[in-house]
Image (tube, rainbow, N blue to C red):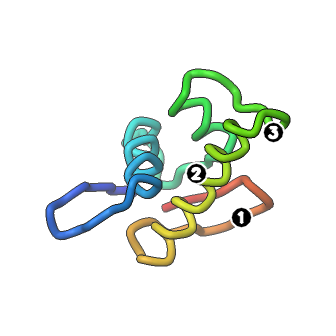
Amino acid sequence: MLKLFIGKSKELDEKEMAVLVALNGMYSVKLEQMITSIDCLGYFITGRFLKTAIKRDRTMLENIRTGIHSLAGRKIITILDQSGDNYLNQ
């Protein structure tokens, strides 16, 4: 079961916080695993699909990518499988 909590014991930077908040919002108790992508997280955070042709959007996409890998590296989330910018999380 995917359980994401933001507690006082975890000091998160703004990239990690944005990704964790988006993952919490997308989480469903009906699923043991979550399938997501950088594009889906970008849409959830901004309400629109981000375009790589726009520098500001590219920066946001890169920050989301950095946030995911940072959370995984700190063992706050677990990436079960990855194909490019598509992720299977637990």
Image position, residue 45 (x, y; %): 51, 33
> Cα distance, mark 1 to mark 2?
15 Å
Numbered circle sitting on residue 59: none
Residue holding disc 3: 52
Q: Are marks 3 and 2 in contact (CB under 8 Å)?
A: no
Residue nearer the viewer, 30 or 77: 77
- Precedes in sequence: disc 3 or disc 1: 3
Secondary structure under tag 1 reads strand
The disc labelled 2 sits on which kind of residue? Ile
Image position, residue 67 (x, y; %): 52, 59
Q: Residue at x 67, y 37 (%)?
A: 56
Q: Residue at x 46, y 37 (%)?
A: 26
- Precedes in sequence: disc 1 or disc 2: 2
Image position, residue 69 (x, y; %): 57, 68
Residue nearer the viewer, 35 or 45: 45
The disc labelled 1 sits on which kind of residue? Gln
Numbered circle sitting on residue 82: 1
Q: Residue at x 78, y 61 (%)?
A: 83
Mark 2 closeness class: few <14, some 14–19, many ≥20 residues within 10 Å: many
Residue holding disc 2: 64
Secondary structure under tag 3 reads loop
- In this rendering, the answer to whether 29 lies above or below 82 is above
Q: Nearer the viewer, mark 1 or mark 2?
A: 2
